[in-house]
Image: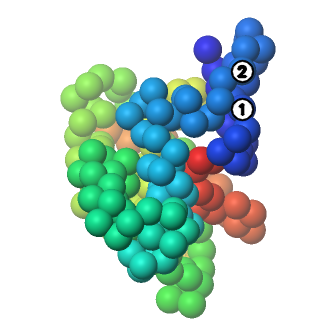
């Protein structure tokens, strides 16, 4: 059943729209081996991954040892994928963002594998998503300007394994980017 999550607080509910049954958000996550302290720590880390342990302790209202142990467990178990700085692309000379739909010439596991392996080696491609619909993949690409994209397209993008067709969408304004998960 589909779940739609919005900005819930820890006392809000999830609604299964197909049956209109509700469950407490904490109960939902606790069934996935997370309790309310874990959820609180994840919210805090998502907001500021560099938050000092002392601040995490105060905000989550737990001991320093408990905080450290829980954060380590959340990382080890894969709930926290990475902690990094979010850079300002335009300030660093990468002000042009393009979303590119890619259609491969064949829809086989081998052709998908070759394409995916190749995009891992191109740093200009920030994100790559296998999608359903008119395209096989969507790529998020950062470049300096249109001329830079044109060079990239001619030399690298259409040379990727199995690429039959691309369609490029240049982003005029980034309305929402890097939004946090609705915990």
- Residue ID at (53%, 55%): 40
Residue 146 versus residue 38 in the image, above or below: below
Secondary structure under tag 1 reads strand
Q: Is residue 124 visible?
A: no
Residue at which label 2 appears: 22
Residue at which label 1 appears: 13
Tag 2: Cα neighbours inside 10 Å, few (<14), some, or many (≥20)?
Answer: few
Q: Earlier in the sequence, mark 2 or mark 1?
A: 1
Side of 83 where 25 appears, left or right: right
Tag 1: Cα neighbours inside 10 Å, few (<14), some, or many (≥20)?
Answer: some
Closer to us: 135 or 87: 87
Q: Which x, y percent locates residue 35? A: 46, 41
Closer to us: 164 or 15: 15
Secondary structure under tag 2 reads strand
Q: Label 2 to label 1, Cα distance in Å?
A: 6 Å
Task: Tell me where residue 8 sits by quadrant.
Answer: top right
């Amino acid at each position: 059943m589909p779940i739609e999550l919005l900005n819930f607080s820890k006392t809000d509910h999830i609604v299964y729209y197909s049956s209109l049954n509700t469950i407490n958000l904490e109960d939902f996550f606790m069934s996935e081996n997370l309790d309310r302290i874990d959820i609180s720590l994840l919210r805090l880390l998502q907001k500021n991954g560099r938050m000092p342990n002392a601040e995490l302790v105060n905000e989550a209202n737990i001991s320093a040892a408990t905080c450290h142990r829980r954060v380590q467990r959340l990382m080890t178990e894969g709930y926290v994928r990475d902690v990094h700085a979010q850079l300002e692309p335009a300030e660093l000379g990468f002000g042009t963002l393009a979303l590119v739909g890619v259609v491969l010439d064949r829809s086989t596991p081998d052709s998908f594998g070759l394409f995916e392996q190749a995009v891992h080696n191109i740093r200009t491609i920030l994100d790559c998503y296998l999608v359903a619909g008119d395209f096989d993949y969507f790529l998020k690409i950062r470049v300096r300007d249109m001329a830079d994209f044109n060079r990239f397209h001619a030399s690298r993008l259409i040379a990727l394994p199995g690429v039959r067709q691309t369609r490029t969408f240049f982003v005029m304004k980034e309305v929402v980017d890097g939004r946090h998960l609705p915990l």
